[in-house]
Every structure is written in C-alpha cells, then in structure tokens.
Image (spheres, rainbow, N blue to C red):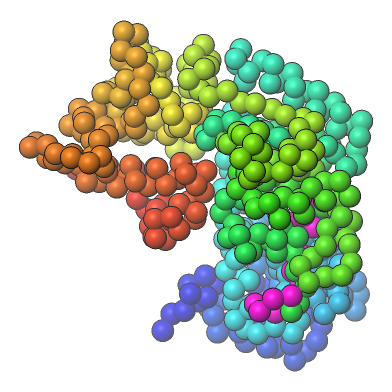
Amino acid sequence: MRTMTSEVLTGLSVLVLEDEPLWRRHLVASLERWGAEVTATDSVSGARKALGSANFDFALMDVNLPDGLGPDLLRDKSIPAHTGVVIMTAEGGISGAVEAIRLGALDYLTKPFEPEALALTLRRARSTQAGRRVAEQQRAESPGYFFGNALASLKTQIERILAADRRMETHLAPVLIEGETGTGKTSLARRIHREGPRVEGPWVEINCSAIPEHLAESELFGHEKGAFTDARTTRIGLFEAAHGGTLFLDELGSLSLPIQAKLLTVLEDHRIRRVGGSKNIAVDVRVIAATNQGLRQLVAQGSFRSDLLHRLDLFRLSIPPLRDRGADLLPLAASLMEGIAVRHRLPVRSISETGRRRLLGYGWPGNVRELAHELERALVFEDGEALNFDSLLGTGGGSPENPATVTSPGLGGAHAGMDSWWNPGFQFPEQGFDLEEAILQIIRAALEQSGGNVSAAGRRLGVSRDYLRYRLVPKPEQ
C-alpha cells in the first residue's frame, strides 16, 4: 500500500549527514522504506565528497559533526540551490538550526523525533522547495514591475525608501502598501526587497487572512516545546526565520487585536518572545505590510489599533486601481504579455484595434491580476496574429460609448446574462446554462475574498487546494 510519504519520496535521492551510528541507520531505514535512494555519511568532509559526485533532492543534516558544522555546507555553497535541506538538532541546539534556516535550509527537527514527524517535515519541505522554484522561475521570467506615467510618484517614493534604507542599514523602518486586490502589492514588496540592502537576506511572506486565529501567534513568533497540546518540539516563528531580511505580512488587517499588540511591540523593541517562552529574542527584520482594506476605517470601527497604524505609516505606498490608470493600461498589457509568452513558450503578439477598445472599455475589478489572466487566456486560446480578447464581449468592453461594468470576463456570447445566476429569481436560459463557468465564478469569488490565496479559498469552499488548481487550469475547447 502506497503512503503519502512514499508518494513524496519515491525515486528521490537523499543525503543523510549524521555521526551517531544507530540514529543514522534508523534514518536510512525509514527513508529507504519510503522509496528514497539514500547516501549516508558521518562527517562534513564525507558530505562534501558526496555532494561533489552526485545530485541530491534533499539533504538531512545534523548540526554538530566531528569535523565541523553541518550548516557550513550551506554557508560555503557546497550544497546546490536545487537540494532542499532539513536540519536535525539536539534539544537545546536551536540556535544552530535557526542559523541554518537563515542560510537557506527549508526546515528543522529536534532530536529525537518519531518517523511521522520526519515524514511530515519532508512533505512540508518538498512543498516549500516547489514553491521556491516556481517563485524563482516567475522572477526570472518577469519583465519587472511596470510603473508607467500613472505610478511615477509611486516610483519616486520607492526610490526615497531605498535611499533611506541604505543610510539606516539595520532596523529598517516598516513599509505599508495599500491597494485593492490584484493591484500588485506583493510584486511591489518583492521589488523593495530585491533592490534594497537586504537582498541577500531571507524573504519570508505570509497571508495573514489564511492563518487560523488560534495559530497566528505561534506562526509569527514561534513556540517552545510543551507550550500547548501539539507543541511537541520547539519551533521558530516567521520573525526569526526572516532575521536579517524581510517579512511580508499580506492582508494585515485580518490580524486580531491581541496579535496586533504583539506586532507593535516587535516593531518598537525589535524583540520577540516565543509562545510558552520566558526570554526575549532579538530580531532585525524589515516588515512590509499590505492591505486591501482601509486601515483608518478599521481603526474607526475598533478592529485595528491606531498606534500600530501610526507605527506603520512612516513609509506608506498607495497603488491605484487599474481602472484609474487608463493611459498605462496598454503599455502594461504589453509588459505583462512578455512574461506570459516566455512562461508558455509562445510568441508575443500584437493587440488589434478591437482588442484595444475592449481592454480600455472594461472596468477591471480584479486589477492587474485579472488583466494578466485575460492576456494569458487570449495568448493560449485565440488564433490569428493579433489578439481580440473575445472573452470580454458583453462585459462592458467594446466601445467608448459602452461604459465599463465590473462583471467577470468570459461571460459574453453564449454566456451572456450568467452574471445574475446567483441572484434570487434567476431563470435558466433556454439555450443552456454554462455550469463550468458558474463553478469558475464561485472559485474566483472565493479567491478574491482570500486575497488570491488558493489554500484559504479552498477552506472557504470546503474543497482541497489541488481541486482548485485543477479547475483553474484552462481546458482546451471540445
């Protein structure tokens, strides 16, 4: 019977670096039982030799070895970027694991641990590793953040922030990015990190709306062993993981007031305390927070702390919605198309006059993210040398005399009138109802409410993340 762990590890190669013979044999036996191809060594020099002669998908490493430290292999780049590293440390050796995380390790385990804990950690590491590869590919393919004339003042603000960063060096001031869902807040935050003095430091991001409230404190600040029922080992939080780099807190307004109070303390004192811990731990983290909600309105409603807003408000960047960037829309579309074409290995195509009218006539409630989705759909499915964006028929795009509406694209033609299907009294059309498009509408609405987080949208809909990803992959027309 195949287990979830065997499905993750079958055919993968793992390097085990552990000097204690019994523990090393135990690890090798477990990994081989799960289908992995294992190479084991008891020294840093042996690990270097193995890494020089073979490629490994994962390295499972102890911290303290007879001839050196396991994390030294990360520090001197002996371990290639495609090898995911999981650190093993004895109780009390948490500082070595934290340092390894900062150097690029995916996760760590405190010895002794049960096979189930190892299996869970490796599954999580595999997922993290895959996410990093996707992010690196997207960054490599991205033509860069497009500012245009409408965002000229925003570009100037960012240049001032970066200049201030170079002067301050440590304890960089937080940045607050405001904008509707899909305007590019995450892309802008990544740009600030990449062009700033902390580009070599870790980039850690979290969608705050996707964290269950009872886990938020542990996720952000870590916890000690025994702090609560499921706290079987000590774990660092995102602040410690981001030490020396940047922590991006998306959808900040969804954090509870008690967590906001702790966040304010970290921003002011540059120290955190793990859940269940008694000592303060110094952290040097640049916090970039993003929100699609009006924080001042939340303050007036009593759901956001005014003192935290004041602390975040030193550097505030506001990204206007795409509907207010009319002159930039077509150049932005051309810029986005370059990256999409590279990703799908397709030629860049021109946009017809009809296509331009449709793009300019549509209201873009999903902003830049929605524009990118429509460009991708047109590049993949439309024939001809120029793109017409036929999916925007019936959505308000088409002519200057037809004002833009904020309906979902893809409902024109045979799908016209589908926007109202979830309203009371809706009558199913005689020519037929597109159930597949209705399902996609539901998924898009859940993604919109979840800030684009697929896992959070899946929880809202009661389905798995994999199901949503399957449904969102464009299907060829029959």
Residue 330 in the image: above or below residue 219: above
18 versus 293 height, above or below = below
Which quadrant of the view contains residue 114?
A: bottom right
x and y percentages locating residue 368 in the rendered image = 50, 29
Seen at 68% across and 88% down, the residue is 26
Q: Is residue 220 left or right of residue 379?
A: right
Q: Residue at x 75, y 22 (%)?
A: 157
Q: Which residue is farthest bottom?
A: 22
In this picture, residue 390 sits left or right of residue 305: left
Residue 320 shows in the view:
yes
Q: Residue furthest top?
A: 401
Quadrant position of residue 90: bottom right
* 234 inside magenta stretch: yes
Q: Nearer the viewer, residue 250 or 374?
A: 250
127 w.r.t. 331: above or below: below
Q: Main secondary structure of the magenta part?
A: loop
* Total numbered labels: 0
Q: Quadrant of residue 411?
A: top left
Please state which of residues 317 and 57 is positioned toward the viewer in this rendering: 317
Residue 470: image location, x then y, percent: 37, 53
Q: Position of residue 356 (x, y in %)?
A: 38, 14
Q: Which corner quadrant holds the N terminus?
A: bottom left
Relative to 277, 452 lies left or right: left
- 401 or 38, nearer to the observer: 401
Q: Nearer the viewer, residue 307 or 365?
A: 307
Give the side of residue 3 with respect to residue 104, left or right.
Answer: left
- Visible in this render: residue 355? no
Stretch in magenta: 227-242
Residue found at the very far front of the displayed protein: 301
Quadrant containing the C terminus in the rendered view: top left
Q: Position of residue 217 (x, y in %)?
A: 70, 61
Residue at (24, 28) in percent of width and height: 412
